[in-house]
Amino acid sequence: MATGDKSPIVHWDTAPIAAFGKEPLRFRHALSDHKLFSDDALAHLLENLERRDYYVNTMDVESHNLRSLREGEIKGLSGREALEAVKKGRIWILLLYPDKVDPAYRALLNDIYAEMEGTVPGMKTGFRKMSILISSPKIQVYYHCDIPGQTLWQVRGQKRVYVYPNQPPFLAQPDLERIALGEAHEISLPYDEAFDAEAATFDLRGGEMLHWPLNAPHRVVNGDTVNVSFTTEHFTPRDRRSFYVNYANGVLRRWTGKQRLSQRATGPAYWAKLGVAAAYKYSGGESKHRKVMRVDFAVDPAAPNGVRPIPAYELRR
């Protein structure tokens, strides 16, 4: 329940709270008409976010083809023109850190977590982040997993979300470790269509949100409409310990060649692994793993699929 005299953001009575974080759960929310996700607000973000604070992709919408995924840029367009390109094209935009442009997004994020922590027994978060997604009809988000705890909030449109178990064969421990170390991208996970038989499948519509277990692989297929949604990411103390264990296991796997490494996040072994993680991080071991992206198109509402080729260049993050 939200604090003070605010109306609740989420209708928590639509799913069992005790299962939160243990299985995929869908809830209804009250943010579909929020002014921060109106076209005017989105256009303002598109015009004011710095280049390092957004991703814009196009990809094959007919198959799971990672090689078709391309990075582009939004340049010389008004926010409304960029939104028109999304409506007509094959474009996926991820806006990072919208609170850099408008602190009201951070205020909303804090309200969400105040309510969440007041509702889910024992939940406490030490890290919080919001990102906004604007995507064309039929666009996909390929099979991947995320490191923090994550919730997907659908504002407008419809998408099908497939959530898979966070264990082999859907998620191999070495793959998760490489992602935790920053050595591999989240979408590098091997995907097999046969996995779908074990997926929990949700048709998510405006006014619904979906939360799934930590690191659970998932993929998304948009319906035949423009989609606006946002994600909230967090670390609880337990999530943070899991991250440190996976990070340290990745280092130890490389150093020792061991294939069977415990994922236990308590006791003396955990504290030893925390030391390994800290030593590797602060020795500069991960500094060479910065992302380098090849940018080869510009968003253009007049171009086929809203995408105009440009001379390729590299963008480092």
Image: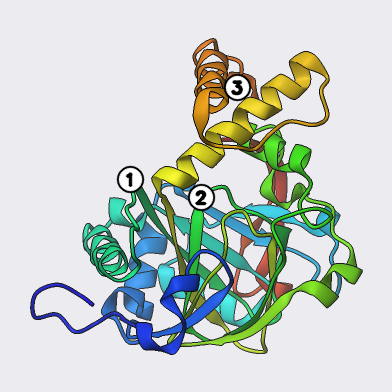
Separation of disc 1 and disc 3 at Cα? Answer: 23 Å
Q: Earlier in the sequence, mark 1 or mark 2?
A: 1
Q: Quadrant of residue 98?
A: bottom left
Q: Look at the image and tell me whether residue 141 can be seen.
A: yes
| Label 3 neighbour load within 10 Å: few <14, some 14-19, many 20+ | few
In the image, what residue type sits under mark 1?
A: Gly
| Label 2 neighbour load within 10 Å: few <14, some 14-19, many 20+ | many
Q: Which of the image's four quarters has the N terminus? A: bottom left
Residue drawn 35% across the image and 58% down it = 123
Query: What secondary structure is found at the residue carrying circle 1?
Result: loop
**Is 59 left or right of 151, judged from the image as shown?**
right
Q: Nearer the viewer, residue 67 or 262?
A: 262
| Label drawn at residue 148 | 2
Badge 1 is on which residue? 126
**Is 193 left or right of 112, judged from the image as shown?**
right
**Is 254 left or right of 244, judged from the image as shown?**
right
Q: Earlier in the sequence, mark 3 or mark 2?
A: 2
| Label drawn at residue 286 | 3
Q: Earlier in the sequence, mark 1 or mark 3?
A: 1
Percent x, y of residue 305: 71, 74
| Label 1 neighbour load within 10 Å: few <14, some 14-19, many 20+ | few
In this view, the residue farthest toward the left is 5
Q: Is residue 272 above or below residue 147?
A: above
Residue drawn 84% across the image and 66% down it = 64
Q: Quadrant of residue 34?
A: bottom left
In this view, the residue farthest toward the top is 283
Percent x, y of residue 159: 62, 82
Colouring used for the render = rainbow
Separation of disc 1 and disc 2 at Cα? Answer: 11 Å
Percent x, y of residue 236: 40, 49
**Is 267 left or right of 255, judged from the image as shown?**
left
Q: Nearer the viewer, residue 97 or 238?
A: 238
